[in-house]
Amino acid sequence: MSFKQKHSKAWNEIKTNDSWALFKIMGEFVHGYERMSQIGPCVSIFGSARTKPEDKYYQIACEVAEKIVDHGYGVITGGGPGIMEAGNKGANIAGGTSVGLNIDLPFEQFDNKYIDHDKNLNFDYFFVRKVMFVKYSQGFVVMPGGFGTLDELFEAITLIQTHKIDKFPIILVGTEFWGGLFEWVKNVLLDKFSNISPEDLDLIQLVDTPEEVLEILDNFYTKYNLSPNF
């Protein structure tokens, strides 16, 4: 029996399952678009799910979210614990829109209690969830985090760099955390290997305080309209 004959049945089952999965993917997009199109201008806050409430970056994220709401925006997070909880908590305290885009994971992820009950969305697919972040955010505030945070950060940078979406503020909070990465991008990607252009460095900004975050957002949106990004 050939390899093809031996595995053809299993391969055909995979292809059939893949085809049916398209309907689930379409359903997540439709549900996400319908719900998110109603929320109004929001800023997304990213960061580690492992950050504890006593951590200074949890407290900074909460304060950033409060100020974001005070300036007329809502807040979107990944809906889980840690920095995500801090962002939703700050929005909740300030009486603003508090959105959670949850993902089904085997660990770490659970809904935090500060999400508006009618703005808590659940996703099975990371790529659908990331589309919602990019399409409906007026800015990214990126706190210290892990691989997931880096993934969301660099996808947004890439989409702006390649003009697949319009530019919006990408703000890294915590120079002690992000400074080394920024220097590597500058010294290695730009100066040593010329893998990016000098203007690409302008796509991200490093700050340390909530006030700096709001200054960047407000300065940007005195020049540009608030709207979905594609």
Image (cartoon, rainbow, N blue to C red):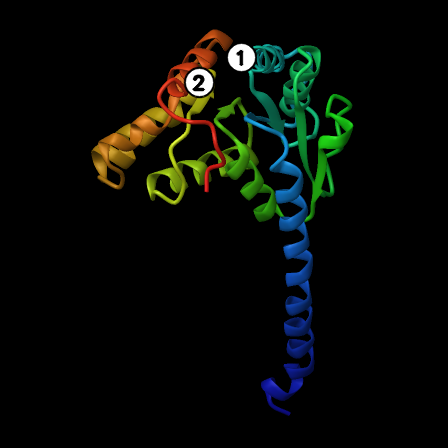
Left of 40 or right of it: where is 103?
right
Mark 2 belongs to which amino acid? Answer: Leu
Quick check: marks 1 and 2 in contact, CB under 8 Å? Answer: yes
Query: 10 Å neighbourhood of mark 1: few (<14), some, or many (≥20)?
Result: few
Looking at the picture, how far across and down is residue 41, in whole percent? 55, 26
Q: Is residue 92 visible in this depiction of the protein?
A: yes
- 136 up-or-down from 43: above or below: below
Alpha carbon distance from label 1 to label 2: 9 Å
Of the residues shown, which amino acid type is indicated by label 1?
Answer: His
* Numbered badge on residue 209: none
- From the viewer's perspective, tell me whether residue 166 is left or right of residue 96: left
Depicted 223 relative to depicted 55: above or below: below
The structure residue drawn at horizontal position 42% and vertical position 25%, both measured from the top left corner, is: 169
In the picture of the structure, the residue carrying the numbered disc 2 is 217
Mark 1 or mark 2, earlier in chain: 1
Asked if residue 108 shows in the view, the reply is: no
Given residues 175 and 125, the one toward you in this image is: 125
Residue 40 pos. (x, y %): 58, 28
- Residue 36 position in % (x across, y down): 62, 37
Q: Report the residue at 45% width, 22% height from top.
A: 172
Label 1 vs label 2, nearer the camera = 1
Quarter holding residue 32: top right
Callout 1 secondary element: loop
Query: For the point 44% across and 22% down, which residue is it?
Result: 171
- Could you say which disc has been placed on residue 71 in the image? 1
Q: Residue at x 43, y 15 (%)?
A: 218
Q: For this view, does 178 lie left or right of residue 93? A: left
Residue 2 at what x, y percent from top left? 60, 90
